[in-house]
Structures are given as C-alpha cells and as structure tokens.
Amino acid sequence: MQTVLPISVYDKKETEGMMMNMWDQAFINGVIVDEDHTFKGNIYVKDGKIEAVSETQLEGNVKETVDLKGRYVLPGLIDTHVHSRDGGATHKEDFFHSTQAAAAGGITTIFEMPNTNPPISNRENFIKQVENFKSKAHVNFGVWGICLGDLNLGNISELDEAGVIGFKYFWGYAVDRANYQLVYNYEEGMENVIPPADDGEVYEMFNEVAKTGKLIAIHAENSELINHMTKKVKEEGGTGYADALRARPALAEQLTIQTGIGLAKETGARLHILHVSSGESVDIIKLAQESGYPITAETCPHYLFLTDKDFEEKGSMMKVYPLVRHQEDQDRLWKGIEEGVFSLVCSDHAPHTLEEKQRDLWSAPAGMCGVETLVPMMLNEVSEGRLTLHDIVALLSSNPAKLYGIYPQKGCIQVGADADLTVVDLEKEHTIRLDDLHSKSKVSAYDGIQIKGMPVMTIVNGQTVMKDGDIVGGPSGELVTPARD
C-alpha cells in the first residue's frame, strides 16, 4: 500500500518514480480537516480503504474521480445514539429510513440502541439484528447490547464477544416479563412486570460489564423521585411545562449520575453518561474526571439549542427524556463542551408518529427525529463562531471512534482507515423542514430553523451515498465492532 503524506502536516516524502497506481475512487481538490490540521489535498481509495492522501494529484488509473471543488472534507461523522425502532415499532421508523436520514445529514456511522423487540439481550438476538440491518443500512452501524439485570447478567460476556459496541442500562425502568420490553412509567403492583433493579443488582451489572472493558452507558434518571414528584404534581393539577420540570427535576439526573460514579469507582467500570441535560450534572461529571476516574459523557442538540422558553412555540414536539431545561443549564452544557467534559454530541434520534406527538404534555411520548439535523445544527455553530471545524471532527468523529474502540478504522483521514468522509459547505444556507426529513415519522422541534453550513456529500466505504441532500446510493453499510484489545 502506497502512502503519500500531506506536506503541510508531515515531512515531505519523495513521490517520484513510484509505480503506476490503480484506485477505485479519487476525491480531489478538497480541504481536509482533522482534529488539529487543515490542508488542501486529495484522497485515493481502493476496496473501501484510504490508500493515499496527497497535496498533489497522483498519477495512476482511477475508476471514479470526484471533484470536491474546495469544500471541506471531514473524517466520516458518527452518531452514537440512535433509536431506529427496528424491530418492534417500525410504523414509527425503520433502519432503512433512519440510515437514509443519517446519510442525508452527513453521518457515515450510527450506533443503534438495544431496546428493540426483541432486545439485544443475548448473542442470538444480536446476530439476528445484524442480519436484519445489513440489507437496510445506507451507512455503517454498530449495535448496543442491553443490561437487564439478573435477566441477562450471564449473557454480557457472549454479547461482548459477539461484537456489541457497548452496553446500555436504562436506569430505573421496569421490564415486561413476557417480552423483556422496557416499561417507562412503572407503578407498584403492575401485573407481569419486573420492577426496576435495586442498587445491588445494578452493582452486579457494572461489575460484569467492567470485565469486558467496554462502556456501560446509563440513562440517568431516578425513577423513584420522578414517580413521587409526578404523582404530586398531577394531584396539584399541573399541566404546563414548568409542572413537567417539577415532576422530572434535574435532581433526578444528578442523583443517578452520582450513584453511577460511585459504582464505577468501586467496580472499575468505564461509565458513560448519556444525554446530559442539567448544568449541575456537568459539574458532578467534571469533578469525577478531575479525580482521575474514566467517566465520560455526551449531550444532544435539543439541550444545546432549546430551553423551557421554547415550549410555548414547540409544544410536545420538544418533549424528550431527560427534559429540556433552563437557559442556565444550556449555558453550562456549552461550557462543558469547551472544557472537554463532553466527549461527544449525539442525536438521541427517537421518532414517534405525528399523532402521538400531538397529544398533551403528559401523554405524548418522549423523543423526536435528530439523526438528520445533528450535523447541520452543529455546523451552524461553526458559522456563528462558537465552534471550529476541528471541534466538529473531535465531537462527532475522532472522539467517538476512540471512545468506542473503532479508531483508527473510523474517525480519521489516514492511510488504512475506512474511506468514510463527510463533505461540508460552510456557506450553504438551509431551512429545516419536516417534509424534507428522510425518516418515516417526520417529527422535530427544529422545523423552520434557518442554518448556515450543510453536509453536501456523504461517502461510506468509498461510495457516495448522499449528494446535495439527495440519496444517490443504496444500502451498503457494514457492521462496525470494537477492536479486540
């Protein structure tokens, strides 16, 4: 394999006299961006892998040449938190549509959450899910495994060996005894429902996942506090968003994070905090990190771009769990990104039908589309001067790849890496419209938002899947598994 290193980053390498080359694709005249450098260059691909990166165009035969016309080329962007509803609730979304949406939004790899029907609770279900996804995947994909306490504690090792990207525990949720589906609003005495795990059972989960070396990621909400407060607020006749925030206070997130950190310290587990919503949670996580513990965290665009003040306009479209909170929380989340408290930003893509989202605040389900709007929303902040393209690469590519053990296969533009690329145009203006989304259910709180900066080409394993907002390639995504190291 021939390596041609970019002069602007590395020492100059003699290229004269090299043998004639054969490439499948050449992506020329781009401005290549990684975590630390920006340079004009050309990328040469063979068999889905990057074969050469050069400031000058190389001699050789190329089957397909794509002129990027000075646009920025980023290592393929990754969304680590996606609920495609496949299987179980495919009337809301399915993997075919969610991966089209991902490609349209500049994402080259997604990590699919495990709370499907059946859940990814054992090796057999993992293998069946991978086979289900292969014929539908427009982008590459990893698959999470689920922690169900004593119900699948003995399956953690086999899930690890099968290749799950990590393990997720939906803290405080009950489980349907018949099909192991999560029960989101548990009440004591429910028939055929297994109550939420106690702290002893959670300790055993942490301990078992720690043996694998993979992340245990937690949905951090204290269900006992939420159930108590929800009952109290409803009895008082609360119906507004301020009442919902009283029913699901930031304290519910903070208590669970503190318990999780304590268990991680005791067991040695690599704890990852999902979709952080509150400012005080950032402070708790930062303190643990400064104490030397391998605690990582993520947040999502809805917490970075919405506050409680938006509910009057957005209504239940912006209902997510944990809830979107106050301006001071949003400000602290952005500060957490600046400080490096957050390893990544992800979408928590979780579509529901329009009819469901139009219900009142208490009965509307939590979740909305996000995989297609994640990158555009973040690129707009580059145009606004809050972020740089290097920040985008770190938060949406290199950091996730390193955290989940798939670097340098993903997350970089270098020889030997998969040829996953996201091409962006920082001058392109766009208005987000529900009707334009590629998801099966088109529900989003971002309808009508005007942005500047858009992904204009998505390249997966060397193949162009999206160009100028249109899907131009069929399903060709491949399973991604962490390195066994």
Image: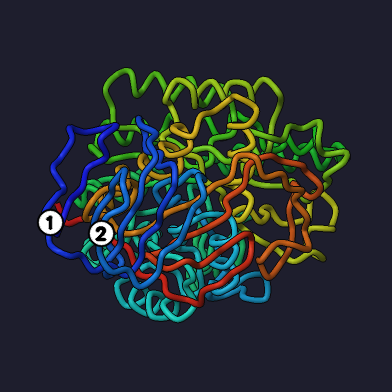
Q: Nearer the viewer, residue 246 or 190?
A: 246
Name the N-terminal-most of marks 2 and 1: 1
Q: Specify the color scheme.
A: rainbow
Q: Nearer the viewer, residue 418 or 243?
A: 418
The Cα atoms of the two marked residues, 2 and 1, are separated by 9 Å
For label 1, count other residues whose C-alpha is less than 10 Å away and answer few (under 14), some (14-19) or many (20+). few
Q: Secondary structure at mark 2?
A: loop
* Residue 126 in picture, x, y percent from top left: 35, 72
| Labelled pair 2, 1 in contact (Cβ < 8 Å) | yes
* Residue 54 in picture, x, y percent from top left: 28, 47
Q: Secondary structure at mark 1?
A: loop
Q: Amino acid at mark 2?
A: Glu
Q: Quadrant of residue 463?
A: bottom left
Q: Amino acid at mark 1?
A: Met
Report the residue marked by disc 2: 59
Residue 113 appears in the figure:
no
Report the residue marked by disc 1: 18
Q: Is residue 172 left or right of residue 237?
A: left
Q: Is residue 257 left or right of residue 481?
A: right
293 versus 264 height, above or below: above
Looking at the image, the residue that sits furthest to the front is 17
User: Which residue is painted at 72% across and 37% down in the image?
Assistant: 247
